[in-house]
Image: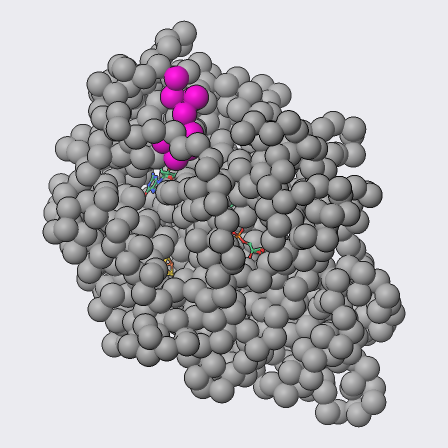
Amino acid sequence: MGSSIEDPTDQLTVTPPKEWAAGVPAVVHAIQYSLRENSARRTALTLLNINQTKGFDCPGCAWPEPAPGKRHKNEYCENGAKHINDEATTRRVTADFFREHSIAELDGHSDYWLNQQGRLTEPMVKRPGATHYEPVDWDEAFDIMARELRALASPDEALFYTSGRLNNEAAFLLQLFARVLGTNNLPDCSNMCHESSGFALGETLGIGKGNVTLDDIHHADLVFVVGQNPGTNHPRMLSALEETKDNGGSVVAVNTLPEAGLMRFKNPQQVGGVIGRGTAIADQFLHIRAGGDLALFQALNRLLLEAEDAAPGTVLDQDYIAANTVGFEAFADGARTVAWEDVLKATGLSRAEIEEVHRRVLGARNVIVCWAMGLTQHKHGVPTIREVVNFLLLRGNVRPGAGVCPVRGHSNVQGDRTMGVWEQMPQSFLDALGKEFGFTAPTRHGLDSVGAIRAMRDGAAKVFVGLAGNFVRATPDSEVTEAALRRCSLTVQVSTKLNRSHTVCGETALILPTLGRSDRDVQATGEQFVTVEDSMSEVHASRGRLAPASPHLLSEVAILCRLARRTLGKEDPIAWEDFEADYGTVRDHISRVVPGFEDFNARVDRPGGFALPNPVNSAVFPTRSGKAQFSLNEFTMLEPPPGHLVLQSLRSHDQWNTIPYAMNDRYRGIHNARRVVLVNPEDITELGLTDRQSVDLVSIWHDGTERRAAGFCVVSYPTSRGSAASYYPETNVLVPLDSVADISNTPTSKGIIVRLEPVADAH
Ligand SMILES: Nc1nc2c(c(=O)[nH]1)N[C@H]1C(S)=C(S)[C@@H](COP(=O)(O)OP(=O)(O)OC[C@H]3O[C@@H](n4cnc5c(=O)[nH]c(N)nc54)[C@H](O)[C@@H]3O)O[C@H]1N2
Ligand SMILES: Nc1nc2c(c(=O)[nH]1)N[C@H]1C(S)=C(S)[C@@H](COP(=O)(O)OP(=O)(O)OC[C@H]3O[C@@H](n4cnc5c(=O)[nH]c(N)nc54)[C@H](O)[C@@H]3O)O[C@H]1N2
Ligand code: SF4
Ligand SMILES: [Mo]
């Protein structure tokens, strides 16, 4: 019952940041965590099945696996092992647990404590006015949901949130159900994640995904890793970069922090990695200021144009530009005017550093740019990524072997989108879906995550259904978001583990426990598998191997099928019962609706699955003009008023998104504390603060409102000037709901303007 678990209190110790990542300590750490959660036998069973062709997909990040023949027996990283063990824990949350703890009491516990209670085991309901959850049988749970959904004045009063853990089959059924019901309200974690990438790439290249393969990374001449911390968040990417280096390629890392994984890597899967010095990853590290990446790529583009002017026909790929792109002239005119003075101010870099990158670019044929949240979660995230595309197009670097690589977060976040989980799917998809199932899909755009919060706040949405994820902690402006959810008539969370979204309830609230990636899934026609798509558009099967956490769990597919039948009634012609009995029937429909999935069942049966085609690699750009689009992006930089810093909210090494697994951030040298703010020593002095001082973080917003996160400890850290860092989700309270990226509407979680207010030390 987890009574032995306590809410952690911060007891900070600081050691110097590490200069290298992975290696033996990482593996030992993973096994320790595993044995704490599991028996030795279960540990072996789970760890040996991660990312194997007959096993399950790692529920961690979306980094792809090597081709089947090239897989290591332990094809997982330290963090993958932690994620899987967190799911495979033998601790259980039972009906007794909910009898003992009121919802108000649960709400007082930390995110860490909630997660540590273990796996959810049976459906629970909080009835109107109740203080506790009580058991409910599945039938009644579906009745409650169907009744609430049918009582809505319009289907647009319902919201269906998903996190990227959801598999393809469930994602496809979810969006089908929402659209048959009559709404496109499909907010998802992508809205907070790579939405800026999707918009920028969709507009410029015609497809919102990356075009490079793992093999392309291995053989590239130059790889940029921008605004990304692979040592923690995509650890096996380090093996790929090591291979790039072995093959003679180089790496440029661009970050506000000197992240350990960007500097040096010791590969735990190679003997040399255990005892040697490891591989230096970044040949050049650009210690950029927060939000300075747009200026950096604008400067690189100006240098390329000037080099071409000086030696025509030698720098730009003029044939490529002429054959495949539009908008070059307008872009080039603008790019030539970017002022060095502005660039140096925005980036905090020297001109010599940028010129050194430029020389590397001139010497490289195949260039790849990888990025993650350090670009997407800024107000100017979309223009920044468009400028990255300009940079690549200039030398014809969007083609096989080179190009764009937005490194996705959740294991199936890209697949969920491919399956139609988006509030603004194109008409071609809606038409194909309607044709396949004999209905007319709604065409009005639905609500994204920020839109969903506004609608709940304003009483315009009343039923919230979350499939996977932890909406209330993933989203900005925590106080506003909590109040918004509490206004709902019904909130439903389909989850594997307890989290804050279960303690912030609508008038009626349901917890529906479900199978995780590692659980065996048996339905009427036998054992089922599901499918996922990784960051490089490879689709493959995932088969759980463990006995489910409880006999009362239903799979996500089963929950959706029963919900749909109960809500839509017997007269609905869609064969929901068949889908639940045999997931292959869902894949048959997908094969006829989603381009690239022809013959899905046969192709996914092959070891390693199959790759979705990316038209860009055949020089087909499905944009409005039919060509790749150069764009003109206005120079923008983040300029906090005097006495303020730009705060980014990021992940520690010991957390999975909204869930801290432990209180450490080993590579950054932070131990036993999460309420810390990393600040450059010169900024500490300039602000009149001292190292280890207690402060409140106070964010400011245009409308004069302030938001406060109390009780943080200042830690002197080599972050770039003006750019502070703290962990998410503790700092989400600071992000104003209206502070979103232009075009993509992504909360600006990496660009929060704050001041640090000294408080009397509690110690
Ligand atoms: N272990 C673990 N793995 C994960 C996750 C997890 O929580 N834990 N989450 C998964 C998910 S959903 C995602 S989306 C990914 C996220 O992967 P990342 O994007 O790597 O995650 P963050 O921790 O948000 O780190 C952002 C990085 O960008 C840098 N940065 C911040 N602002 C700027 C800037 O303005 N410019 C530049 N150049 N750099 C900047 C930060 O210093 C940091 O290194 O990871 C996935 N993998
Ligand atoms: N300030 C700030 N906010 C951010 C970010 C940031 O960098 N800074 N990052 C954003 C990003 S990139 C993302 S992706 C979002 C993440 O947002 P979410 O995806 O919503 O959050 P997670 O923490 O991944 O969700 C964890 C919960 O998922 C449930 N779960 C796990 N596995 C399964 C499963 O197999 N099935 C089901 N049904 N449930 C499961 C468990 O109950 C667990 O408690 O947060 C965003 N929010
Ligand atoms: S790199 Fe990502 S997908 Fe691979 S094992 Fe680690 S967490 Fe899992
Ligand atoms: Mo993400």
Relative side of 113 to 636, left or right: left
Q: Which residues are magenta?
A: 105-113
In percent of width and height, residue 120 lies at: 26, 31
Residue 652 in percent (x, y) is at 47, 49
How far from the left and from the top, in percent, is residue 102? 35, 14
Is residue 106 part of the magenta span, yes or no? yes
Question: Residue furthest toward the top?
Answer: 129
Left/right placement of residue 682 relative to residue 114 reads right
Q: Is 184 drawn above or below residue 650 in the view shown?
A: above
Residue drawn at point x = 48 percent, y = 41 percent: 12
Locate residue 285: give its quadrant: bottom right
Instruction: Please determine whether, in this image, residue 115 is positioned above or below residue 199.
Output: above
For the N terminus, give its image quadrant: top left
Residue located at (64% from left, 32% from top): 696
- SS assignment for the magenta stretch, majority: helix
Q: Residue at x 40, y 33 (%)?
A: 8
In this picture, is 90 found above or below 233? Answer: above
Depth order, front residue of 464/327: 464
Above or below: residue 268 compared with residue 315: above
Residue 453: which quarter of the image? top right
Q: How many marks?
A: 0
Q: Is residue 589 visible?
A: no
User: Residue 545's x, y, as percent?
Assistant: 17, 51
The image quadrant that residue 345 belongs to is bottom right
Residue 602 falls inside the magenta stretch: no
Whether residue 634 can be seen here: yes
Q: Quadrant of the C terminus?
A: top right
Residue at 43% from the left image edge and 64% from the top image edge: 21
Front-most of 185 and 246? 246
